[in-house]
Image: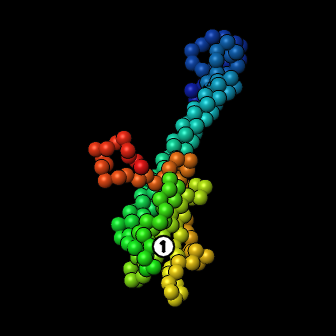
Amino acid sequence: MKKIGNWKLSTRGGSSSGREIGNSSQSEAGFTLIEVLVSSAILVILAMGFLSIQYVLSQNQVSAWRNYLSIESANVAMSAIVHELRDARASDIGSYTLEVANDQEIIFYSDYDYDGVVERIRYSLSGYNLTKGIVEPSGSPLSYPLASEKTKVVSDIVQNATQPIFYYYNSDWPSDTTNNPL
């Protein structure tokens, strides 16, 4: 038997201690093909599981961000509506402050841009969009020509488009819940 480093070379198949080359009865160091394939399959399954969890978490984050943007858009729109309604007044031609009050539309008069002229302001729901229309008075005598209405989308992600977006309450609210909302 000849020794080469940590290896012993056996030419006759005899038994001796240590690692031997040429002895088929003793296993060689390393991994078999089956072991490599099984461990690779386990690694692939774990990686796919991790990526699936990552995908679900990212989708939840996107959904939460969209919900936040929807709520923020609604808050901005409602703040503007509340501010303009609190400044509502009779029109420059003597019309009542509130022209229309429906479930999906409200029309009133207010000086929203503080130029000393009262504009006709309309908020309405069009599909999933909350739109704002503004008519400046013009002419002599003054009038509010509806053809000159300038509209813009205030919020484009209204979620409850089939339900009323405007509710109206009388002066007995909150003690009178039977007759409120009107």
Secondary structure under tag 1 reads: strand
* Residue wearing tag 1: 120
Residue at 50% across, 53% down = 103
Q: Amino acid at mark 1?
A: Arg
In which quadrant will I find the N terminus?
top right
Observer-nearest of 12 and 101: 101
Residue 70: percent from the left, percent from the top?
49, 54
Q: Is residue 65 visible?
A: no
Question: Which residue, as the protein is rendered here, is positioned at the far bottom?
Answer: 140
Viewed as shown, does residue 58 lie left or right of 88?
right
Q: Residue at x 60, y 13 (%)?
A: 16
Q: Is residue 133 above or below residue 115?
A: above
90 in relation to 106, above or below? below
The quadrant in which residue 117 appears is: bottom left
- Crowding near pointer 1: few (<14 within 10 Å), some, many (20+)? many
- The x, y position of residue 86, in whole percent, is 35, 66
Judge by depth and name the residue closer to the eye, 6 or 41: 41
Image quadrant assignment for residue 93: bottom left
What's the residue at 64%, 15% (across, down)?
Answer: 26
**104 lies left or right of 171:** right
